[in-house]
Image (spheres, rainbow, N blue to C red):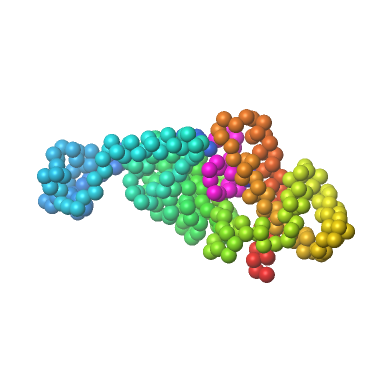
Amino acid sequence: MLRFPRSSGFILICPVPKEKKMSQQIPSLALKPIHEMMLNDSIKGIPGGVEPFPLREISKQGWNVLREDLPLPLMVLKQDALRHNSELMQHYLQRCNLFLAPHGKTHMAPQLFDLQIAAGAWAITAATVSQIQIYRRFGVQRILMANQLFGRQNVLYIVEEINRDPKFEFYCLMDSADGVRYLAKMLRQCKLSRPIKVLLEAGFHGGRTGFLDWGVINVTTPLRDASYFVNMAMQVEDRRTHEEDLLRHYLDARRALGGEPIGWDEAWQAHRLHALYCVVAACSIVTFPTDAPERRRIFADAFLARVEAAIEDLESLDALGAAREA
């Protein structure tokens, strides 16, 4: 089932069980190993000649930055300002019904991960599997990899973590059909025990990346609305039974009214492509606040089932790949 996380530019192509709402809080982290980490003068910011001591005892050193007890330059985080900013962002997200997965690569500090999670972060974002290894060491349970998952060892590590920990939720990006095929092949080889969650990265026409080319709705035939109606106005089985007849009727009526003739092969190819427009159109329907009535959720589920079936039946991603190569 296609899923559209609220306030997100991405599309989840794997199921999100109804009992797992997007706002579900992930647990706090296991920071004891950091507190026990030994510090010595080989670490930047620690004065020379200091005997090794655990981080939890740093306050016992009695150091004062203003007295220049520590070698400069130093970066200082003010706890009250940090918490103020965190709470301010938390209130903003709650007010706007948004979910945030802050990037952890900038600070790579598990203590800050923990603060962000406590403030309601939906996940922690990473750029590389090496970063994810640090996240997992301290217990981050939901990770968004803002990158594609490639490389045998990288895939193997993620598979092992998913298989080992049933509570671990992992998301990654893909921006091409080739990338999805590669990942699917590697996951089969590594014996993944449950589905991985993949986000399709959207691009723009002529851009460098993008699994779905939003420009497709503007640069192809004028069949977009007709195809949208056929794909979305009927139950899936009715559409499968009648779509060819309906499209042929549309082409005949168009020609009879003086419209530019469109050949069947061209029209069918356009119909396959325009199933992808249903994804764009669905964004305004399936994104809703957390207090939306149940009937809207039921409607959204039915709508998304039609989107998914149309894209699969018409092999729209293959059609898009062929159009790009033409």
Q: Is residue 320 left or right of residue 64?
A: right
Q: Is residue 198 above or below residue 166?
A: below
Q: Is residue 199 left or right of residue 124?
A: right
Query: Residue 9 lies in magenta, yes or no?
Result: yes
Task: Find residue 264 and report its image quarter.
Answer: bottom right
Range of residues picked out in magenta = 4-21
Q: Residue at x 55, y 49 (%)?
A: 10
Give the farthest residue toward the front.
258
Residue 160 makes an appearance in the image: no
Percent across and percent down for residue 55 are: 23, 42
Percent across and percent down for residue 87 are: 37, 35
Q: Is residue 136 left or right of residue 219?
A: left
Q: Nearer the viewer, residue 228 or 200?
A: 228
Percent across and percent down for residue 156 are: 49, 54
Q: Is residue 258 above or below residue 305?
A: below
Task: Find residue 91 and report its image quarter.
Answer: top left
